[in-house]
Amino acid sequence: QVQLVESGGGLVQAGGSLRLSCAASGRTFSSYAMGWFRQAPGKEREFVAGITRSGTNKRYVDSVNGRFTISRDNAKNTVYLQMSSLEPEDTAVYYCAARPSDYSSPIYYTARSYDYWGQGTQVTVSS
C-alpha cells in the first residue's frame, strides 16, 4: 500500500507557473505508475498526465500538452507536475494517483485504473 500527499497548489495569475509535488510513502514507489488528475467544480475528474514506473514514458491530455510536464524522482519517492502558461480553465483540485505496475504496463488514462489517491491540492488561476 502507498500513501500519497500532494503539495504546491495555490493562487496564480494567468500565464504564471506552479509546480505540484506528490510525496509517496513506502519503499516500493518505483513499482507504481503515477498519474495526475484534476476536478473542477461540477465536472468529472479528468486525466491530466501519466508516467510509467521508470519515468520513460509520459502522456498528457491535449489541453495541457506543451504547457505541463510530469516527472518523477524514484529516489525521493516523489512525482511532480510542472505547470506553465496557466489558464483560468486549469483551475481545479489536482490529485495524484498510483497504480502497481510492471515495466511493460502502459500509461493509464482513467481514474478507475488507479488504486491509491492523494487528498488533492487546489490550483486557482485568476484572469
Image: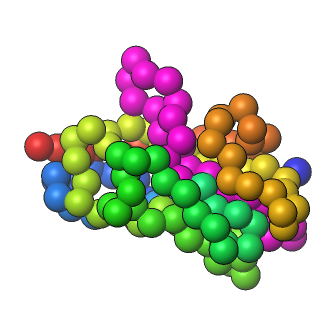
User: In the rendered image of this protein, does residue 72 appear above or below residue 9?
Assistant: below
User: In the rendered image of this protein, does residue 117 appear above or below residue 81?
Assistant: above
Q: Nearer the viewer, residue 22 or 81?
A: 81
As for residue 32 lying within the magenta part, the answer is: yes
Identity of the residue drawn at 25% across and 54% down? 86
Q: Nearer the viewer, residue 53 or 93?
A: 53
Identity of the residue drawn at 60% across and 55% down? 50
Identity of the residue drawn at 49% across and 54% down? 60
- The range drawn in magenta is 22-49
Q: Nearer the viewer, residue 55 or 72?
A: 55
Farthest top residue in view: 42
Identity of the residue drawn at 22% across and 41% down? 88
How is the structure coloured here? rainbow
Residue 112, given in percent of the width and then of the height, sits at 72, 32
Residue 29, given in percent of the width and then of the height, sits at 79, 66
How many tags in the picture? 0
Residue 3 in sight:
no
As for residue 100 lying within the magenta part, the answer is: no
Farthest bottom residue in view: 75
Residue 124, given in percent of the width and then of the height, sits at 29, 43
Image quadrant where one finds the C terminus: top left
Residue 59, given in percent of the width and then of the height, sits at 55, 57
In the picture provided, is 13 more to the left or to the right than 105? left
**In the figure, residue 41 lies in which quadrant?**
top left
In the picture provided, is 80 more to the left or to the right than 97? left
**In the figure, residue 55 lies in which quadrant?**
bottom right
In the picture provided, is 66 more to the left or to the right than 104? left
Residue 97 in sight:
yes
